[in-house]
Image (spheres, rainbow, N blue to C red):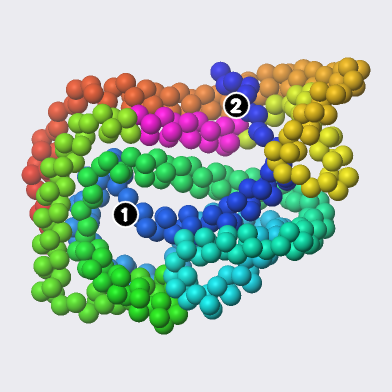
Amino acid sequence: MVEEGELDVAPDDDVARDDEEQALDMDDDAEEASAMEDEDDNDPTAMEEDVGEQEGAGAPDEAAAESGNPKARRGRPKDQNAPPRPQNPFQRFSVEARQRLKDTRPELASDLKGMAGALKEEWDKVPKEEKDRLQAEFDKEMEVWRPKWDAYRKTPDYKSFCNIRQDWMDERNRRKLIKRYSKDAPARPKSSYMIFASEIRTRVAEEVSKAGGGLSDIGKKISEEWAAVSEEAKAKYAEESAHMKEKFKVEYAEYKKTDRFKEFMNEKAKLESKQERDKLIRTKLADAPKKPPSAFALFRTDAIAKIQAQGRSLTTGELAKEVSSMWKALPDEEREVYSKKASADKEKYDREFAEFQKQGQYASYLQELLKVKLRENRQLNLRCAPKRPPSVFALFAEKHKDCKLQ
């Protein structure tokens, strides 16, 4: 039986969006740089599988580059079908400031984290009067944008994008978990190409920076230099990579016996299970009746509309405090109006949800939910159970895994 609370979806608060968007935009470059730096982070559960693949790894696929296939974009996914949201004050300021910083400090062109910090420093220097002017322009543009946004949120395109964005957020949270625990794991062995790249990256980065290039140019130049390396030299890098692999196997076998590894596996299982349950609700229960708002939630909607009509600009925290104070000061007779409305909506919801539970879509949800919970139970409670002995074929495959087909 699904809990009613699981179907409750928090409203999209425009005030919260403003604060979140500015914070994310100030942090976007820094996070992208951090992701690139940690691209080789060790996933303690994937290390063994990756080691075999790395041994034959080389430079990036040149055929893909020649075919013109674009590289997957880093960072938050963008909704191309949504009405363009006006740039907030920091975004508008950053357009000019970013180019100015590139001209005066060329080294920032290839240093995303440094650029993010420099933009924040420049923004902190902007006078309050200028920030207020930018905020006033933003507020006027938002008055035009909000009705378009409200209409778009009712379309299938918006629902589709919400699933894409949530999948991205889930992946980001998994990466954060891996990054937190990988600090204690043995370093993953590098491929021959990565060993070569680490030797020349500093020199190449300096050359590219002097030429006014960016991060993508660094990778391209390293790939070009690798292509010019002789086969004899590549063989030496491959031999070094093989030694690193053997050392890693020993260290990793010991690491798997530690409490830290078990702790990671438990957290990973819980996180993935929660994400899968949430996704089932988003997909299997998309047509379920939505849980109605409480009396306070109904009041909050009216209160926020009144505050916005007054032209007051409040942060998310200030707005929450203001609405809470207004609710506490609300006369009992007016509060009763909201309570009766919420009670009537709740009775209607209960009837509609009871009908929805009779549909095959809900039965399918329960079946998938059971599978997720059983998988989590196995990962948390049966990981140390005796494993089934390998088959004859599995033993044969293990013995000949390093053999290459002619």
Q: Nearer the viewer, residue 302 or 365?
A: 302
Q: Quadrant of the N terminus?
A: top right
Q: Which mark is residue 60?
A: none
Question: Could you say where residue 358 lies in the image, as x and y percent from the top left?
Answer: 63, 20
Question: Quarter-wise, where is residue 309 in the image?
Answer: top right
| Amino acid carrying mark 1 in the image | Asp
Residue, disc 1: 40
Estimate the spatial distance between the alpha carbons at disc 1 and disc 2, rounded to whole Å.
36 Å
Placement of 357 over or under 281, stated as above or below: above
Please tell me whether mark 2 sits on a helix, a strand or a loop. Answer: helix
- The residue at 40%/81% (across/down) is 210
| Furthest residue toward right | 333
Residue 363 in the image: state x and y as whole percent. 55, 24
The front one of 358 and 291 is: 291
Badge 2 crowding class, 10 Å Cα cut-off, few under 14, some 14 to 19, many 20 or more, is few
Q: Residue at x 81, y 51 (%)?
A: 147
Q: Which residues are magenta?
A: 266-285
Q: Earlier in the sequence, mark 1 or mark 2?
A: 2
Is residue 216 or residue 112 the one in the foreground? 112
Q: Which residue is mark 2?
A: 6
**Which quadrant would the C terminus be assigned to in this image?**
bottom left
Whether residue 270 is in magenta: the answer is: yes
Is 125 displayed left or right of 260 in the figure?
Answer: right
Q: Say few, some or many: other residues with alpha carbon within 10 Å of mark 1 (under 14 / 14 to 19 / 20 or more).
A: some
Asked if residue 60 lies in the magenta stretch, the reply is: no
Q: Does residue 57 sit above or below 68 in this rendering?
A: above
Counting from the top left corner in percent of width and height, residue 352 is at 72, 22
